[in-house]
Image (cartoon, grey):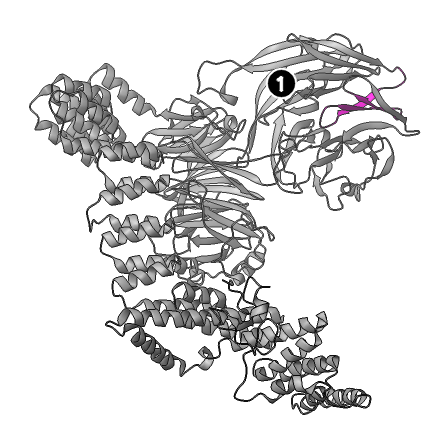
Amino acid sequence: MLFYPSKKITIPNNVKLKCVSWNKDQGFIACGGEDGLLKVLKLETQTDDAKLTGLAAPSTLSVNQTLEGHSGSVQVVIWNEQYQKLTTSDENGLIIVWMLYKGSWYEEMINDRNRSVARSMSWNADGRKICIVYEDGAVIVGSVDGNRIWRKDLKGIQLCHVAWSTDSKILLFGMANGEIHIYDNQGNFIMKMKLRCLVNVTGAISIAGIHWYHGTEGYVEPDCPCLAICFDNGRCQIMRHENDQNPVLINADMYVVSIQWNHTGSVLAVAGSQEANTQDKDVNVVQFYTPFGVHLGTLKVPGKQISALSWEGGGLKIALAVDSFIYFANIRPDYKWGYCSNTVVYAYTRPDRPEYCVIFWDTKNNETYVKYVKSLISITTCGDFCILAAKADENHPQIASKEENDMETFGATFVLVLCNSIGTALDPKYIDIVPLFVTMTKTHVIAASKEAFYTWQYCVAKKLTALEINQITRSRKEGRERIYHVDDTPSGSVDGVLDYSKAIQGTRDPICAITASDKTLIVSRESGTIQRYSLPNIGLIQKYSLNCRACRLSLNCNSSRLAIIDTAGVLTCFDLNARVRDSTGQQVTGELLKLERKNVWDMSWARDNPDLFAMMERTRMYVFRNLDPEEPIQTSGYICNFEDLEIKSVLLDEILKNPEHPNKDYIINFELQSLRDSRALIENVGIQHASQFIQDNPHPRLWRLLAEAALQKLDLHTAEQGFVRCKDYQGIKFVKRLGNLQSESMKQAEVVAYFGRFEEAERMYLDMDRRDLAIGLRVKLGDWFRVLQLLKTGSGDADDSLLEQAYNGIGDYFADRQKWLNAVQYYVQGQNQECLAECYYMLEDYEGLESLANSLPENHKLLPEIAQMFVRAGMCELAVTAFLKCNQPKAAVDTCVHLNQWNKAVELAKSHSMKEIDSLLERYACHLLGKNKTLDAIELYRKASYFYDAAKLMFKIADEEAKKRTKPLLVKKLYVLSALLIEQYHEQMKNAQRGKAKGKNSEATSALAGLLEEEALSTTSRFTDTAWRGAEAYHFFLLAQRQLYEGSVDSALKTALHLRDYEDIIPAIEIYSLLALCACARRAFGTCSKAFIKLESLETLSSEQKQQYEDLALEIFTRHTPKDNRKSELDSLLEGGEGKLPTCVATGSPITEYQFWMCSICKHCVLAQEISNYNFCPLCHSPVG
């Protein structure tokens, strides 16, 4: 950052100034002084030259108004930017509020309090309240419209300063004795502020200034110090808030009169006077600090006594009230910015976000890419890439990197993020040293703290496989990263290691700047020592001694010369390879060249010439050739690039006024004198004289200029000579081709096309009646719209193939812009079926895609691709049709499987005699079972008509649920489903055999064959015979309990007796417990006794349970004889036997009648008189009919 004086305004009659204030929004400057002096001034730039903007533009005094109203010395002037008001007070206690009306300032309100003097005034952040403090302790808070909100008298206190907090909830009052009291916004005392900067300070002190930055432009860091308090003895503390226990402490070592933050809160200016070493009188100085107390520089100001300072709204100028003058100084900020691959990268803060907003502005296409980085330290660029250095956030890392090893990032406090020119993070590196200084080359990034420097040989994967990229990201241990202490003397062998303990070791001579080229690294130290290292293997080559402390270094393109800008803005050049003799006569390497320029704030070497460099001095750009300057150019731009005798400069000051919308006008190209002279010679004198001048001052850019000028005049010999000298092979070939042409007009047209004047070239071709060449030109340019127009407007038939090419070219144009509907129209005319298919797919026009597929011949190469489009859309039928049309039945089956169309898959597999369908089904079913999706597997088998396999799985589920003691109704349903699947399997077998059998006895034969095949299958699993047993068991189990609860104890007992046949399905304890309960309820104590005997003999019961059953039996049968009352009715049920009667599934009773209803599905019977009560079978729930 550089500060230098730029302008001075003299106040008439030598009236001494007391105060000055610069309106941040409108640019007015108010100054007050003795004898009631109050002036409002305004500096405005007036220039027609677009390049002369910002600080470089000349400024004139557009407003110079003296405001009458004060009689005493004006002591305070403050602006209210939000409401465009000026508030002033004088030594007599008179306060005036001024308003702007038609370009002039007029009195709006007056407050005259004769009893005391208003020492300080402050508007709050939104400009709605003003706080005025008087010397006698009176405090008044008023509104912007002049109404008093509250007033308070602080007895026995002499006030001199006041400041609002950002949120307007706190007021700070500065006392004459140096104390600062904290009050709330209603005037209630809270506490005294701890002034840690005054520890061990003795004697009388007074407050020089209190300034609380309100965050209107954001903060440079989250939780950034923003409250500055400074005392006249130079002691200063910068706090994060009013109760900050750990403020930043500064000792400016000067007598301070005024302090103020700039518009972003990034620089604090401290104005006052300092004792001069060589003079008796004091020297006026302004010191500049960061919010963290880092000293940025010193500005010396002429005059006897400085009294006040004020920043301009953009932070690029500062106004200083000295004696009867206002001095202006220009500020050249150290912006966080860089330039890579036609992209300007710059960062700024926003009030709505805690991070830095980093903009990647592609100046070629005028596109911006935004990236947010927390606690950004610097931006460094080289080639096509940039490095963002920032603090690493533990909770939210800047870049989430899976490749980084946990051990590598553990404890890392800073990160270097390698980005491309659109802001995409390519590779982050976490480091444990503070990257105060960062430089980069095409292969290396070097970051330095004050004690050590870290080197990283970065690698950018352009055409690497994923495996190679992974290996690159993990090759940290292979030595691509090293750390060296500045006091070490590395030899150049592979001796550096990634040892952060080196960074902790201190040094007496810290690093202050670094720079690097492809083969050299330069490290500058505060003592003036320059250390030169080799790259890529770091080896200390040479040490040089200079008498300055560098703040910026730059190497030329062949690493022979080093440019140094020191902390005072003085530029010097050092020849690294020159051999000279020192004062003792010994030969030494390195020589300080005879060049010294002051107030330099930017410089850049030419990329293609080691003797050329450009530098910014104040508001002028100088170009030096062999240390001789050319005529300066008036500008305030930062140098982006210096190449081909052209300097590209960016007006960052203007861009950052509206950083979200950069303007291309702020990129300015300057041509060097030799380029301008050569162009003038060619235009005014002739090619021959210009050729002689260029031979005397050779440069590839000048030869190219000559060659192009000769081309336009068809001087092919000179043009070829020029192209040869600038090594332009394409240009040489073009000249050769021109030489083979006979027609001069043809040559002229070709030259016009070469220079990009295509409209003119086309017109010339058409004038020569060479429509073919005009069309060829447009084809080369890819201007298919014009090609089509030329083809249609010309006489004669157009070439069909070229016409198709034009239609397809226009279709491609619309497709590239995703205008698929427009593209379809042209692809249809161009008969481009492949692109047409893609357009239909992108438009989701599947009817169009289907008609396209139907129009294609069989086995067309596009059919599989169209089929895949249908697959991705889930349209199975259309996909299968397309696959079959291109003779790919296997793909059709795979599609059906993929889309779960199993019936279709089986049908296709059978019709095309494919054997792998069984294995495919089995594999998919195994996959589903492996994921515990048994029901999905059952559904799969069922849809594929594999009823036997589906039944097996369903039976397995029913058994598992029965063991879990799930609700009996659910278990019954599962067994019914299993049995129904078995019935479907039986029917399937019969139908299959019926289809195979032929002849008279086909029906009997098929039934027999089906039974035999079933028998063969069921030998391994017997559940096919007993498929309904599980359903029967749980059906009767539920029926018995329902009958019991309904009071039908006879029916309940009969049903419960049937359950004895199902002990293999329902646990015996459940069956006999229910049987005993039903028998007891029906008073059939004989049956009940047998049930208890069975229960007591069960081996699965514990001794406690058996005892409980015995006790219960004893209790029942001591009261009742274990005999059945109506034995004759139970005989048939109790005896059982071979001639067992069928059971009614509705009542549980045996069927003794000849007429009964039988279910067509489950083959179970119901009494004839009972079935009329049912619409569905009680067991399998199939319809009755």
Q: Judge from the rendering whether residue 419 lies leftward or rightward of residue 843; answer left or right.
A: right
Residue 459 pos. (x, y %): 39, 52
Q: Is residue 536 magenta?
A: no
Q: Which residues are magenta?
A: 114-143
* Res. 848 image quadrant: top left
Residue 176 pos. (x, y %): 84, 30
Q: Which secondary structure type mostly characterizes the magenta part of the structure?
A: strand
Tell me which residue sits at (63%, 72%) in the image. Answer: 1038
Q: Say which of 106 and 1159 sits in front.
A: 1159
Residue 130 pos. (x, y %): 78, 23
Q: Judge from the rendering whether residue 449 lies leftward or rightward of residue 621; answer left or right.
A: right
Q: Judge from the rendering whether residue 1046 lies leftward or rightward of residue 632; answer left or right.
A: right
Vertical position of residue 197 compared to residue 82: above or below: below
Q: Judge from the rendering whether residue 781 lies leftward or rightward of residue 905; answer left or right.
A: left
Q: Say which of 969 and 913 sits in front.
A: 969
Residue 298 pos. (x, y %): 61, 32
Tell me which residue sits at (47%, 72%) in the image. Answer: 953
Tell me which residue sits at (59%, 55%) in the image. Answer: 506
Q: Amino acid at mark 1?
A: Gln
